[in-house]
Image (spheres, rainbow, N blue to C red):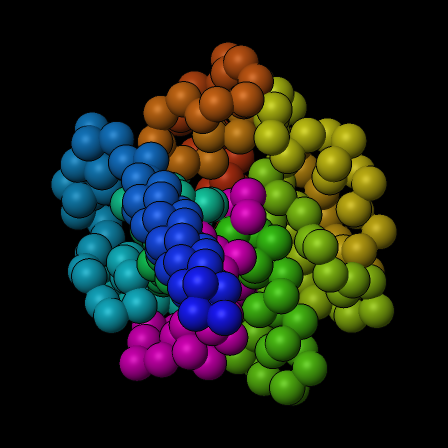
Amino acid sequence: MRAALRRIRAAGFLALTALAAVLLVFLAWAHAVAQGERPAAIAAFDDERIRIETVAEGILMTPATAAAEVGVIMIPGARVDPYAYMDKLRDVVAGGAPVLIVRPAINLAIADQRGLDALIDGVDAAERWVVAGHSLGGTRACLVAAGAERDGDDRLAGLLLLGSYCANDLSSTALPTLSISAENDGLSTREDIATRADALPAGARLVEIPGANHASFGDYGVQAGDGPVTASDDEVRTVLTMEITRLLRGA
């Protein structure tokens, strides 16, 4: 009997040790983020048309002049540095729209269970917000939007997907929605986005950026499994600015 108990204790100890090792490996992986490229970040910080500050929720970018009523909450892709999105979005901010780039829990948007209320807690840069996300950040943005719609939160102004698609069904809503994809995206492919397009709110607008790939929506280097890129950063920024501004004006 005692020998059997010792074996059970030993097996339990080994199982707990293995679980702890797996957890440590997972946490190390989750915290190994794709760093934002320094030149792009400097370009954003040097842009006199905008102000950038670190807040509890993440990175808040506001126009140097008066801000618009509607802002953008940007949820990064999995294990991507929030700073990697500043340069691509700075012209949107310069045009008047505040942008809050959030820091997801353990750098994984899909593991972050915060709703709209928690994401903008203490941030009064805008009265209403378009929830946006890149890659898995977009999948999380769809869930945030669904929760805000269910709660009747009138601060929700729209949904913006960048190289992403919804895993949940929002087709019964009329939420202003824009889905921007990349022609050469090797991770959120044309087929993936087309397959899930029926889950988007009625009237959703779909735009594709020629020559762009999955990593084109930020500035964090090459991403494994991605397609080739021929579109320049300036070209991608121009399309993003034009299309996002159009969404904000109609939200």
Quadrant in the rendering for residue 192: top right
Q: Using residue 204 as the reference point, say whether residue 234 is left or right of it.
A: left
Q: Position of residue 84 (x, y in %)?
A: 32, 40
Q: In the drawing, does residue 194 fall left or right of residue 42? A: right
The structure residue drawn at horizontal position 17% and vertical position 36%, both measured from the top left corner, is 42
- Horizontal and vertical percent position of residue 91: 36, 44
Q: Position of residue 158 (x, y in %)?
A: 61, 65
The span picked out in magenta is 107-136
Q: Is 159 in the magenta?
A: no
Above or below: residue 154 compared with residue 82 = below
Q: Is residue 210 left or right of residue 238?
A: right
Considering only vertical position in the picture, is 204 above or below 194?
Answer: below
Foreground residue, 180 or 81? 81
- Locate residue 68, reporting x and y percent: 41, 67
Say which quadrant the C terminus sits in: bottom right
Please count the marks in the image. 0
Q: Which residue is painted at 53% across and 57% down in the image?
A: 110
Q: Residue at x 29, y 61 (%)?
A: 58
Is residue 41 visible in the rendered image? The answer is yes
Q: Magenta stretch: residue 125 in it?
A: yes
Which residue appears at 45% of the width and 59% of the height? 7
